[in-house]
Amino acid sequence: MSQAPSKVGILIFPGFEPLDVFGPVEAFHTISKKLAKINLVWIGPTLDPVGSAPKDIHTTTMGSTVDTRVVPTHTYDNPPEDLEVLLIPGGLGPRVPSSDGAVAFVKKTYPKLKYLITVCNGSEIAARAGVLDGKKATTNKFGWKESVATGPKVEWVRTARYVADGNVWTTGGVSAGIDGILAWMAHVYGREVARQVANEMEYEWRDDETWDPFAYIFGEYA
C-alpha cells in the first residue's frame, strides 16, 4: 500500500460529462477516508469555473439549462509536478476545438504518469494525443464510430466494460467509469479494498470487464 499512487488529477474541460467525473471521484472520496491516502486535484484550461454545458457547446435540443461547474485547482500550463494518476472524462467537450489544449496536456504529461484512466469518450482525447497507439482500449458504445475514428492506430475493443493495457485503463460510457475505477482500485490497492469501496457507495459493482450489454444495444452504430 505504501507504494500505491496517491496523487490523482481530474482533467476538466468545457463540455465534460458529469458522471464520468463524479462517479470515479466518489470512489476516490470513499477510499480516501480510511483505506488509502489520496490527494486529488482538478486540472483545467484556466482557474475559472469549467462547465459541463457551456453556452458555446450545443448540449440540448430542448432549450434546457443544466450546467455543472467545477473550479480547477491547477491549469494545463501549471499542473502539479508530482502527478501520478490522470483521469480523463468524456462528454461533448472532446469533440470541439477548445479540447486541443487538453490533448496537448495529455501528450506532454503521459510519460510522467504511473496510470492514465479514461472514461467514456475521454478516450478520444487520449487517442488524439497518441498515447493509445498500439494499445487495446474501449470507449462509449453509443458514439462508437466517432470515438474510434480519432485513433486509427488503437486496437479498439468493441465489447468491454473496461480495458487495461499496461498503465492505461479505458472504460465504456458514463456509468462504466465507476466499474472501471473500482477494477483499477482492485489492481492497485487489492480486491478487498475495492469491494469495500463499492459496498460503502452502495454500488452494485460489475466486476467483469466483458460485461457490456451496451455494445449490443447500440450495435447498429458499429
Image (cartoon, rainbow, N blue to C red):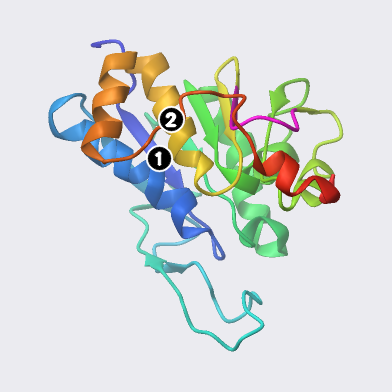
First reached walking from the N terminus: tag 1 or tag 2:
1
Q: How many marks?
A: 2
* x, y percent for residue 198: 30, 33
Mark 1 highlights which residue? 9
Q: Which residues are magenta?
A: 157-163
Is 135 rendered above or below residue 48? above
In front: 178, or 169?
A: 178
* Residue in the image at 53% along x and 29% along y: 116
**In the rendered image, which quarter contains the N terminus?**
top left
Q: Residue furthest left?
A: 34
Q: Is residue 18 visible?
A: yes
Q: Which mark is residue 85?
A: 2
Find out whether the residues at labels 1 and 2 contact each other: C-beta distance under 8 Å: yes
Q: Is residue 113 visible?
A: no
Give the left or right position of residue 188, taking residue 29 as reference.
right
Which element is circle 2 on? Answer: strand
Is 96 part of what is drawn in magenta? no
Is 162 part of what is drawn in magenta? yes
In front: 169, or 99?
A: 169
3D distance between C-alphas at marks 1 and 2: 6 Å
Give the left or right position of residue 203, taking residue 99 as reference.
left
Q: Which mark is residue 148?
A: none
Q: Amino acid at mark 2?
A: Val
Is 52 rendered above or below residue 84? below
